[in-house]
Image: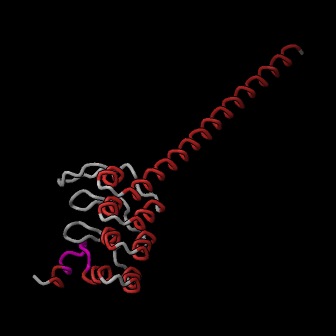
C-alpha cells in the first residue's frame, strides 16, 4: 500500500507532510500544517509523536512550536519513552530545557520492553550525560522548593483560618456572657 493510501486510511498516524516538515526542519511548513488543523499529537508507526521527532532532531524552534501548539509532553512511544527521555537519550540539552520550562513530569518512568525502566534523570546519569543530569537535578530541586513553599503557605493559611474561627467563637461566647448578665 502506498504511503498516500496508508495516510488516508489511518488519519491518526503522522502525516507524510508533517514527517517531511520535521525531517527538513521546515518551521514554516510545520506551522502551515498546524494552522490547517494537523494534529500535533499524531505519531508514526513507532508511536513517536511530532514532539518526539522534533526533540530527536534537536531543533529548538520546531520543539517550541509543537509545545506551544499543545503537543502532549508525556505521550510515550512504543518503547514507553516520553519526549523528555528521548531528549536525554539523544543528548539534546536544549530540548530538555524547553520541556522542563513547559512543565514536563520529571518523575515518569519508562514503560517499555527495552530494559530501560528508569526516569529521565536515571537515564542521564547512567548515560554519562552530566550536563543534562545536572539540569534535571536542579529542576527537581527547584520544583521541590516551590512545592515546599506552597505547602508552607497553605499550612499558614489553614492555621490563620483556624485562629480566626477560634477568635470568632471566643467573641460569640463573650457576647453570650454579656447578654446573660444583662
Q: Quadrant of the C terminus?
A: top right
Which coloring applies here? secondary structure
Front-most of residues 72 and 105: 105
Q: Quadrant of the N terminus?
A: bottom left
How far across and how far down the image is residue 62, in percent?
A: 40, 76
Front-most of residues 113 and 8: 113
Identified at 64% across, 36% down, the residue is 156
- Is 129 left or right of 103, judged from the image as shown? left
How far across and how far down the image is residue 121, in percent?
A: 36, 51
Identified at 45% across, 65% down, the residue is 98
Front-most of residues 114 and 131: 131
Identified at 72% across, 31% down, the residue is 164
How far across and how far down the image is residue 81, in percent?
A: 27, 58
The span shown in magenta is 7-15
Identified at 45% across, 63% down, the residue is 97
Front-most of residues 102 and 134: 134
Q: Is residue 9 magenta?
A: yes
Q: How many marks?
A: 0
Up-down: is 9 above or below 131?
below
Chief secondary structure of the magenta span? loop
Up-down: is 16 above or below 157?
below
- Is 26 left or right of 171, judged from the image as shown? left
Amino acid at each position: 500500500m502506498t504511503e498516500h493510501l496508508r495516510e488516508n486510511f489511518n488519519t491518526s498516524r503522522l502525516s507524510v507532510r508533517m514527517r517531511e516538515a520535521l525531517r527538513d526542519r521546515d518551521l514554516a511548513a510545520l506551522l502551515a500544517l498546524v494552522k490547517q488543523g494537523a494534529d500535533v499529537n499524531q505519531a508514526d508507526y513507532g508511536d513517536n509523536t511530532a514532539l518526539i521527532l522534533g526533540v530527536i532532531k534537536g531543533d529548538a524552534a520546531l520543539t517550541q512550536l509543537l509545545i506551544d501548539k499543545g503537543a502532549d509532553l508525556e505521550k510515550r512511544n512504543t518503547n514507553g519513552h516520553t519526549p523528555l527521555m528521548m531528549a536525554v537519550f539523544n543528548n539534546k540539552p536544549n530540548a530538555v530545557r524547553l520541556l522542563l520550562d513547559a512543565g514536563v513530569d520529571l518523575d515518569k518512568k519508562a514503560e517499555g520492553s527495552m530494559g530501560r525502566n528508569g526516569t529521565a534523570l536515571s537515564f542521564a546519569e547512567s548515560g554519562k550525560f552530566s550536563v543534562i543530569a545536572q539540569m534535571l537535578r536542579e529542576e527537581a530541586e527547584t520544583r521541590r522548593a516551590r512545592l515546599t513553599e506552597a505547602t508552607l503557605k497553605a499550612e499558614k493559611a489553614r492555621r490563620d483560618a483556624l485562629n480566626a474561627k477560634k477568635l470568632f467563637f471566643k467573641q460569640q461566647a463573650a457576647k453570650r456572657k454579656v447578654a446573660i448578665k444583662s
